Amino acid sequence: MITLYTWSTPNGRKIPIMLEECGLPYTVVPVNIGKDEQFAPDFLKVSPNNKIPAIVDDEAEGGPLSVFESGAILTYLAEKTGRFLAPSGPSRYKALEWLHWQMGGLGPMLGQLGFFAVRSDEKAPLAIKRFTDEADRLLRVMDRRLSEGPYLAGADYSIADIACYAWTLAATSFLKEPLAGTLVNTPNVHAWLARVGERPAVMRGMEVPKT
């Protein structure tokens, strides 16, 4: 059994999607970051950076194993199940490229844009422009990539798509006002969102945790 610590954020949705895709049994421990529950001492033992998501795999080789950071968790679960990440070769590294692209670029930039353009009561025009421009650039990078094939790693759905889905969906909903100019010019991104979003496991994962 896997214990999943998560919340209803784009980062928090990645691992439920992966667990649903893999058909692994899991239980959910909601960590309400709006109430600072991520700073609880018990959670710190699982996630040293006080961030969701995190997991504990009771059936890991050698005994219970905790894993934090969404990219590490996705890679761990892919290797545990043999799904959504090729064991070797170019396909593996294409998936890892785009996984790390999401973790180092798409997620952080959209997160900063969300803070400065939407959530913050005090608007900082320079910061909003900076993160809007970078989000615009990243979504165009994604659109060009998806013009070459149906999924980010190429022909096959992978952990890269799982990592990017909830963040990209947020770009078209929560961030649709600051990114309106970009979103009308990224048809391949929209087609990919529809393709990934119709997967039953993605639909189920996007509902975890129920709040």
Image (cartoon, rainbow, N blue to C red):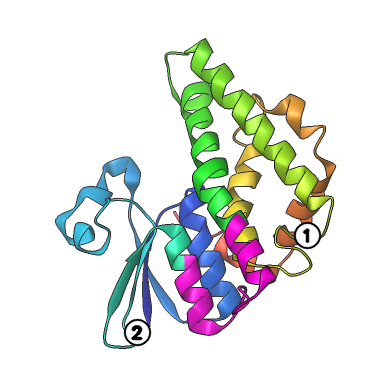
Can the viewer see residue 174 in this picture?
yes
Q: Earlier in the sequence, mark 2 or mark 1?
A: 2
Coordinates of residue 182 in the picture (x, y in percent):
74, 30
Coordinates of residue 148 in the picture (x, y in percent):
84, 54
Coordinates of residue 140 in the picture (x, y in percent):
74, 37
**Residue 171 found in image quarter:** top right
Label 2 and label 1: CA atoms lie apart by 33 Å
Q: What residue is at 59 percent from the left and 35 percent from the top?
A: 174
Front position in the image: 68 or 200:
68
Q: Callout 1, which amino acid?
A: Arg
**10 Å crowding of disc 2: few (<14), some (14-19), many (20+):** few
As for residue 180 lying within the magenta part, the answer is no
Q: Is residue 27 left or right of residue 83?
A: left
Q: Callout 2, which amino acid?
A: Ala
Q: What residue is at 34 percent from the left and 67 percent from the top?
A: 67
Of the two numbered discs 2 and 1 in the rendering, the one whose residue sits closer to the viewer: 2
Q: What segment carries the magenta color?
A: 74-97
Q: Which mark is residue 195?
A: 1
Front position in the image: 67 or 122:
67
Front position in the image: 203 or 52:
52
Above or below — where is 106 with respect to 128? below
Q: What residue is at 58 percent from the left and 46 percent from the top?
A: 167
Q: Main secondary structure of the magenta part?
A: helix
**Residue 29 found in image quarter:** bottom left
Above or below — where is 75 with respect to 102? below
Above or below — where is 40 with respect to 60? above
User: Which residue has dot 2 on it?
Assistant: 60
Can the viewer see residue 162 in this picture?
no
Residue lying at the far front of the rendered structure: 89
Q: Is residue 30 left or right of residue 176?
A: left
Q: Secondary structure at mark 1?
A: helix
As for residue 77 lying within the magenta part, the answer is yes
